[in-house]
Image: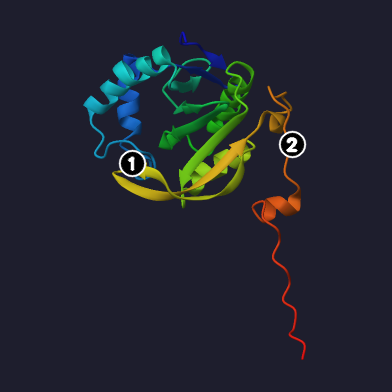
């Protein structure tokens, strides 16, 4: 796919370029980003250069990952980075980080929502997933504000710093944003959903003598 630009009320989302290397290098010095996001640690200039010069263009070229940098609509520094990755039939996964000085203003929630709408309307996605290591409360707050429903915990579901970690998984569907889906969706009855589709266990009955 050819790289493109999305806009929101406050933001411009566009593919990062080598001109963003300094901003990305600075943002990724944050210990919180290095703790929770699968980026190299320590994060060096060569990592930022490789990200903007090779990883981002190759992802767009091969349709394996669509990465965006979020900046103010009027221009300014990189506020956040977001991507759609790990494509599977009908499903994409969203990931993101926010520069420390721009947190708490709702920027990434705004950007994630725009990215979700683009995925559902342009990529024909029918499910958008979010994953974060258990304990990453900031990422979970963004996901929930964007409408994701946390569906549970995946054991060893995330590899970070060569260590498998348990992660939360959540999902957003087109219907959650009032959008149509390519296929109709038939939710499981509430009782079946609670028991994983298995019959509910019978209640204990006292033995009779």
Q: Which residue is mark 2?
A: 186
Q: Nearer the viewer, mark 1 or mark 2?
A: 2
Q: Residue at x 44, y 17 (%)?
A: 63
Q: 2 and 5: which one is in front?
A: 2
Q: Are marks 1 and 2 in contact (CB under 8 Å)?
A: no
Give the quarter of the image for residue 98.
Answer: top left
Q: Which residue is mark 1?
A: 34
Q: Which mark is residue 54?
A: none
Q: Residue at x 54, y 30 (%)?
A: 107
- Where does the image place residue 96, in percent across and percent down from the top left? 46, 33
Q: Is residue 150 above or below residue 82?
A: below
What residue is at 43 percent from the left and 22 percent from the top? 65
Q: How is the image coloured?
A: rainbow
- In the picture shown, does residue 25 fall above or below 170? above
Look at the image and tell me whether residue 74 can be seen: yes
* 172 with respect to 200 (left or right): left
Query: In the depicted view, which residue is nearer to us: 90 or 172?
Result: 90
Q: Position of residue 199 (x, y in %)?
A: 70, 58
Across and down, in percent, residue 171 comes to: 59, 38
Whichever of callouts 1 and 2 sits on the residue coming sooner in the sequence is: 1
Quarter residue 32 falls in:
top left
Residue 127 left/right relative to 186 = left
- Quick one: SS at disc 2? loop
Give x and y (percent) for residue 200: 71, 61
**Residue furthest toward the top?**
2
Quarter occupied by the C terminus: bottom right
Task: State how far apart marks 1 and 2 are (Cα).
Answer: 40 Å
Quadrant of res 182? top right
């Amino acid at each position: 796919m050819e790289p493109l630009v999305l806009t929101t009320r406050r933001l411009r989302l566009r593919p990062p370029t080598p001109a963003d290397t300094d901003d990305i290098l600075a943002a990724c010095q944050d210990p919180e980003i290095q703790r929770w996001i699968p980026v190299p640690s320590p994060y060096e200039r060569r990592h930022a250069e490789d990200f903007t010069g090779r990883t981002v263009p190759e992802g767009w070229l091969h349709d394996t990952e669509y990465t965006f940098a979020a900046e103010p609509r009027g221009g300014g520094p990189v506020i956040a980075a977001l991507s759609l990755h790990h494509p599977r039939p009908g499903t994409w996964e969203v990931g993101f980080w926010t520069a420390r000085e721009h947190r708490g203003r709702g920027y990434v929630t705004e950007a994630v929502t725009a990215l979700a709408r683009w995925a559902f309307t342009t990529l024909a996605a029918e499910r958008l997933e979010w994953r974060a290591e258990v304990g990453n409360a900031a990422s979970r707050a963004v996901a929930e504000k964007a409408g994701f429903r946390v569906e549970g915990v995946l054991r060893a579901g995330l590899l970070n710093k060569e260590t498998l970690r348990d992660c939360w998984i959540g999902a957003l569907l087109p219907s959650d944003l009032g959008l149509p889906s390519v296929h109709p969706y038939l939710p499981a009855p509430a009782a079946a959903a609670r028991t994983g589709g298995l019959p509910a266990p019978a209640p204990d009955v006292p033995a009779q003598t």
